[in-house]
Image (spheres, coloured by chain):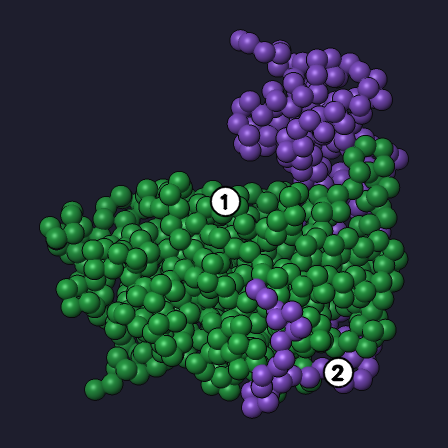
Chain colours: A purple, B green
Amino acid sequence: MSGPAPAATAATVAAFAETLLPGDDLFPSATQAGAHGLLLDRLRWRLGPDGIDRLAAGLGDGFADLAPEGRVAAVRRLEAADPALFHEARSILTFAYYASLLVVRAIRSLGHVYNDAPQPLGYALPAFRAVPGETVPTTPRGWYKRTEDVSRVALPADGAAR
Amino acid sequence: MSRDGGHGAAVVHPPADVLVVGAGLGGALASMTLAEAGLRVVCLEQGGWVRPEDHPHASPDWEWQRSTLWNTAPNARHRGEDYPVDSRDEQTLMWNGVGGSTVVYTAAWPRFRPSDFRKGTEHGLAPDWPITYEDLAPWYEAHDRIGGASGLLGDPAMPPREPFQTPPIDVAPLSRVAARGFERLGWHYWPFPDAIISQPYGGRLPCNNCGACQSGCPRGSIHDASVTVWPRALAAGADLRPFARVHRVVVGDDGRAVGALYRDRNTGATHLQPAGTVILAANGVGTARLLLLSADERHPDGLANSSGQVGRNLMHHGLAMVEAWVDDETEIHKGAISGALICEEFAETDPARGFVNGFTIHVVRMNGAGFQANGSHSGNVPPWGADHHAWFRRHFGHGIAFLLVGDDLPLAENRVTLSDTLVDGDGLPAPRITYRLCDNDRRLMDFAVARAVELAEACGAWEVRANPFTDAAGRYTPPAWHLLGTCRMGTDPATSVVDPALRAWDVPNLYVMDGSVLPTGAAVNPTSTIGAVVLRAASALRDELTAG
């Protein structure tokens, strides 16, 4: 086997996830939500088996052992040096994080009606009513040019050049 | 079936009256119309069926699936039925399977305006259609009855029409916030027409506002041709063959289409399906590609291409997104993606603006928390790290999004050709797409973005982000939802590919029935118009084939 030990890579990925999405008094952190595991799987799916090694290498040896400010600096260096890889990893992590049941519960705690998934429940919304100023204009607006009224317009001054 | 040495080891099927290539909306409507008249119809489709339970809507990772296996871009999706698209200019969107791209669209259902059919008369930078709005109006109505449309009568910005099948789909606070901006500016707005039913219709369930239209609709509330059209076509006896990838249209010595050679993607066997009439309905990219793939010694530049117009005049619409965030709760993750309001204030040409043609503003939605935390439509990506959750608390549920749809001019150099580097799973050259906005269209979109920013401010926005779909180098690289114009209809064989009946000028029994026949694209989503155009032509073909 070559390259860093799997356990070290796992620690790096977990630390990366924690750095991007730490928890607070309501939201769980990325690892608490389980998102780092999906990051491992999906980065492999998107970039191949070397994808996770690229991420770990970009963060540098000993990333997981760094103090929080050191991790932030390392992530910023990766973001600047390999923006495509960083974007891919962050996107995957974000989708995984916000699909977590615990994060969904946090969103609900903010007062939003937010389902685990779009179906089967969907969302209850009020049935349509024509309310002036809210769903239809307060005064009639809009017009269209009838077929028989279409005639040549003067092209813009610079000829509407293509 | 038999073997035909003239076509390699092809399995030769009994001839059909009509062969349809592509089971999307155009192919479905044509197959239904012709099969219901008793004609023997065979339809070849390179993809398969999508079952309700296949959609990702019931899975917590639906947003991840939407960005991967359910991505609307085949280049991001990589399904076996897909072919790659060779382009640096755009992200072509399509679905290859029964129902075509109606499987994964928002079912936005505005109609073209009467002037959209008369751009040649109006400014001459695009052709007139060979038909008028009035010619098409009854077919718009017929199409709506098939798919079920929701909306509100009385829009002063559009010609009168017959009643919608259902009322507008449910409204949310989003519409109220947007209406506030429109009212302050005095601009037109109206409830968005959709091919999404708000009440039961045709045995189908109404929309329950789940907010995930772009991954299709497992409830069947959206006018997805696999749900609304194919059951009728199959009941009438149409022979739909999924996983059948057409390689070329075969033409006889008399210049008439003989049928099509296709490969069964399950068995690998090559088949020849003869037919008296052939209809291509493989979308505005796929149909042009297939005609180019059908080149032979007699048609070295591709079939039906004596005009040189096959693949040219590609239109996608000029597109941009402007997103804003307001203090109001907008609940923007709920409801049909394109189910709020439409503004047609700027839809007609006003040369004083410095460009011809117009645009519409669509008040649309932002999907779920994952999409919004990944930048939504505008690329407003939240910070990572300690500030992330504060950003999310402030933004989530407070967004409002404006999609700007501009009428792009048909340019000969915007075109589909064959790639010399990419091939599909059968080794066939992929389509290569070249597309740019001309100066007129850039001015139009710049004006549109400025108006949307103005609208956002009138709505009370505290943050506004515009996405003009340009890359880091400033090149316009839009998501290409609408694939139009590449086999346009006209009255002159020198400048068009098909005649007003959608019959190829060069091949008397070959028709094109999809978005590629549209001479202009208007400033709205094209699917209602594509269906109307196809129904009109398929009905005329039916009458011709069944006469006497």
Question: Quadrant of residue B347 in the image?
Answer: bottom right
Give residue B241's position: percent from left, percent from top. Answer: 32, 57
Q: Residue at x 76, y 31 (%)?
A: A20
Q: Nearer the viewer, residue B205 or B324?
A: B324
Q: Is residue B514 above or below residue A88?
A: below
Read off the residue under disc 1. Answer: B75
| CB atoms of marks 2 and 1 within 8 Å | no
A123 or B468, which is in the foreground?
Answer: B468
Is B385 positioned to the left or the right of B337 in the image?
right
Residue type at mark 2? Arg
Q: Which residue is mark 2?
A: A141
Whole-percent x and y of residue A124?
A: 73, 63
Element at label 1: helix
Could you tell me which chain the residue with mark 2 belongs to?
A: A
Instruction: Give the residue furthest to the left.
Output: B5
In this view, the residue in front, B239 or A85, is A85
Badge count: 2
Q: Is residue B365 visible?
A: no
Dot 2 alpha-carbon crowd within 10 angstroms: few under 14, some 14 to 19, many 20 or more: some
| Towards the viewer: B159 or B228 | B159
The amino acid marked with disc number 1 is Asn
Residue A78 position within the rendered picture, expressed as x and y whole percent measured from the top left:
71, 26
Q: Do marks 2 and 1 both belong to one polypeptide chain?
A: no
- Please tell me in which quadrant of the rendered image residue B232 appears: bottom left
At a point 85% along the width and 46% down the height, the residue shown is B393
Q: Residues within 10 Å of mark 1 (few under 14, many from 20)?
A: some
In the current view of this chain or complex, which residue is farthest to the front? A158
Given the image, what chain letter belongs to the residue carrying mark 1?
B
Residue B213, visible in the rendered structure: yes
Residue in view at x 18 percent, y 50 percent: B10
